């Protein structure tokens, strides 16, 4: 099972399907080769991998943060 430190969890079902949830809601369902690829990647950094695979990785505020005086 995935960790809930930042809200992401994953469950691997008996048929090989992987279901990724974020705060209790289904964020992605992976099957076949994509599920196997996800499982191989999730071992390194689970929260980052799940964020990337669900598309919850970038929100468009990176440019604004880059231009902030504190980050120059």
Image (tube, rainbow, N blue to C red):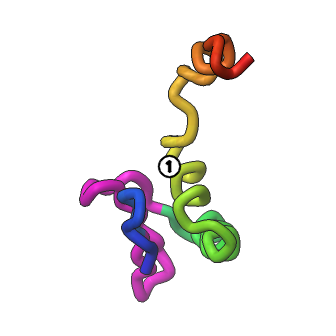
Q: Residue furthest right?
A: 72
Query: Closest to the observer: 66 or 56?
Result: 66
x 65%, y 12%: residue: 69
Query: Closest to the observer: 53 or 47?
Result: 47
Q: Secondary structure at mark 1?
A: helix
Residue 60 located within the stretch drawn in magenta: no
Q: Is residue 13 left or right of residue 45?
A: left
Give coordinates of residue 30: x percent, y percent: 51, 63
Residue 13 located within the stretch drawn in magenta: yes
Q: Is residue 26 left or right of residue 61?
A: left
* Crowd tier of the residue under label 1, counting other residues whose Cα lies within 10 Å: few below 14, some 14–19, many 20 or above: some
Q: Quadrant of the N terminus?
A: bottom left
The residue identified by callout 1 is 54
Q: Residue furthest left?
A: 24
Q: Residue furthest bottom?
A: 14
Instruction: Please tell me whether the stretch drawn in magenta is mainly helix, strand or loop.
Output: strand
Query: Closest to the observer: 19 or 9?
Result: 9
Q: Quadrant of the C terminus?
A: top right
Q: Is residue 12 left or right of residue 67?
A: left
Give coordinates of residue 56: x percent, y percent: 49, 42
x 64%, y 19%: residue: 70
x 38%, y 52%: residue: 27
Residue range corresponding to the magenta coloring:
10-29
Give coordinates of residue 60: x percent, y percent: 55, 21
x 63%, y 67%: residue: 45
On screen, 27 above or below 37? above
On screen, 1 above or below 18? below
Report which quarter residue 22 is drawn in.
Answer: bottom left
On screen, 39 above or below 65? below
């Amino acid at each position: 099972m995935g960790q809930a430190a930042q809200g992401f969890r994953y469950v691997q079902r008996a048929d090989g399907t992987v279901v990724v949830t974020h705060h209790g809601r289904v964020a992605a369902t992976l099957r076949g080769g994509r599920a196997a690829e996800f499982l191989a990647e999730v071992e390194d950094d689970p929260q980052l991998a799940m964020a990337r695979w669900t598309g919850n990785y970038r929100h468009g505020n990176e440019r604004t943060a880059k231009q902030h005086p504190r980050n120059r």
